[in-house]
Image: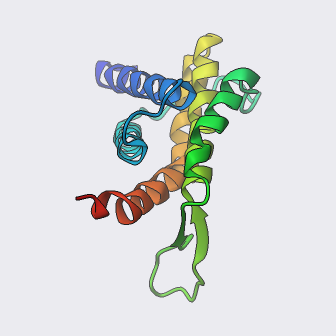
Amino acid sequence: MNPTHTAAAHAFTEVARGFCAWCEGSSLGGEPSVTAASWLSKLYAAALLLPNVEPENSDGVPDLPAEEAARAQSNLACFNGHYYREYFDPDPTLDEESVMGDVGDDLLDTYKDIKAGCVLLERGHPAEALWQWAFLHRVHWGRHAVGALFALHCLSISKRE
């Protein structure tokens, strides 16, 4: 990996670890909506710079540590039921009905994908972790992060005094 890619990978890894620690922590902080939006924007921005690497193996997404995943699910439950309308494809030429999104589901799905990369990294598979993070950013967690960020902004942040 060239130095630019190495720096981008390191930067994303630090944000990923911080996000997971926040999700698993004992407190979501004073304004959870603001903190969640901050983490999602940092993750998304850092993911845009991830290097294009090939996976080393085809073992897929690893199982998450059960205790940490349970803490994250419990902590993020305060966002469950924060529903919003969204479209899977915003192309205005398509005749598509809106669907209901849920900020809690978005945050938990984002956590699971990010945590899976952290687990791969801890197991000594950095290329696999980078590939998982970048690929799932494009096809899964990136959509959840953007949906949740938009919803948090519209439903909470823009209405603050």
| Quadrant position of residue 115 | top right
Q: Is residue 54 visible?
A: no
| Quadrant position of residue 75 | top right
Does 49 appear above or below 120?
below
- Asked if residue 112 lies left or right of residue 44, the reply is right
Instruction: Choose between 13 and 67: the one closer to the eye.
Output: 67
Q: Residue at x 44, y 62 (%)?
A: 151
Q: Measured from the top left, where is residue 38 in percent x and y?
A: 34, 41
Q: Measured from the top left, where is residue 66 in percent x and y?
A: 75, 24
Instruction: Choose between 40 and 6: the one closer to the eye.
Output: 40
Image quarter where the C terminus lies is bottom left
Q: Residue at x 60, y 84 (%)?
A: 97
Q: Is residue 151 visible?
A: yes
Instruction: Choose between 136 and 40: the one closer to the eye.
Output: 40
Image quarter where the N terminus lies is top left
Q: Measured from the top left, where is residue 118 in percent x and y?
A: 57, 22
Does 103 appear above or below 24?
below
Q: Measured from the top left, where is residue 142 in percent x and y?
A: 50, 50
- Asked if residue 119 lies left or right of residue 3, the reply is right
- Asked if residue 73 lies left or right of residue 59, the reply is left
What is the residue that sits farthest to the left in this orientation?
A: 161
Q: How does the figure colour the protein chain or chains?
A: rainbow
Does 10 appear above or below 138?
above
Does 80 appear above or below 109?
below
